Amino acid sequence: MKTFKLVGLKVEQSEQQDKPLKEYPLSDGLIINREDGENRWMIEALLDKTYESDFAPYHAKNKDLCLYVTISKKGNNPAKLQATISSMMTLDNHVSILFEGKMLTSRSNVDPEELLKSLVDDGLSGDALLETFNELYYEKRVMSKS
């Protein structure tokens, strides 16, 4: 097994069309490649206790989540995983969430210029353009890896 630092965590929010991904600020985190030949990973995310209610329903129902994790450095592209929560532990001010999932991979063909043009055509500019472009560009790159 190989262990890496988890530096970013986003969760797909299927019911929200305007913000398809929700980013969670990490207090700490690890991601472990199980190296079992099936591309399975374990992720431990230490989050502020206020986010516990976001994950409790998934844990209670053993429901799949689509995670986008950034490994080692903030500048790395996020990787997409299909995961379930295997355990949640409430601490004083934090919640430790242990996910088990499978990394979804393949090559991306997202054209950044085409995406940028479509956002400008939609009337976006300034900070809104930059934020939307970054979110959609990385989401499309990661989603196309599934």
Image (cartoon, helix red, strand yellow):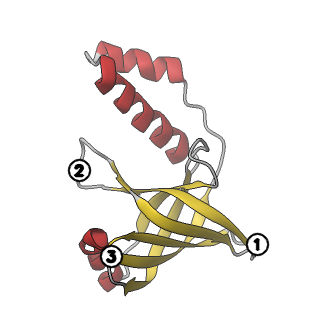
Residue for point 36% across, 84% down: 91
| Residue 54 screen position, x and y as percent | 27, 69
Q: Secondary structure at mark 2?
A: loop
| Residue 66 screen position, x and y as percent | 44, 61
Q: Which residue has dot 1 on it?
A: 37
Q: Residue furthest front?
A: 92
Residue for point 39% across, 86% down: 89
Q: Where the N terminus falls, by quadrant?
A: bottom right
Instruction: Pick whichever of labels 1 and 3 is earlier in the sequence.
Output: 1
Task: Say which amino acid is labelled 3.
Answer: Tyr
Residue for point 29% across, 78% down: 56
Label 2 with label 3: CB-CB less than 8 Å? no
Quadrant assignment, res 141: top right
Instruction: Pick whichever of labels 2 and 1 is earlier in the sequence.
Output: 2
Q: Which residue has dot 3 on it?
A: 58
Q: Secondary structure at mark 1?
A: loop
Q: Residues within 10 Å of mark 3 (few under 14, many from 20)?
A: some
Instruction: Pick whichever of labels 2 and 3 is earlier in the sequence.
Output: 2
Task: Say which amino acid is labelled 2.
Answer: Gln
Task: Say which amino acid is labelled 1.
Answer: Gly
Q: Which residue has dot 2 on it?
A: 16
Task: State the CA–CA distance, disc 2 to disc 3.
Answer: 16 Å
| Residue 82 screen position, x and y as percent | 50, 65
Task: State the CA–CA distance, disc 2 to disc 1.
Answer: 34 Å
Residue placed most toward the observer, 79 or 108: 79
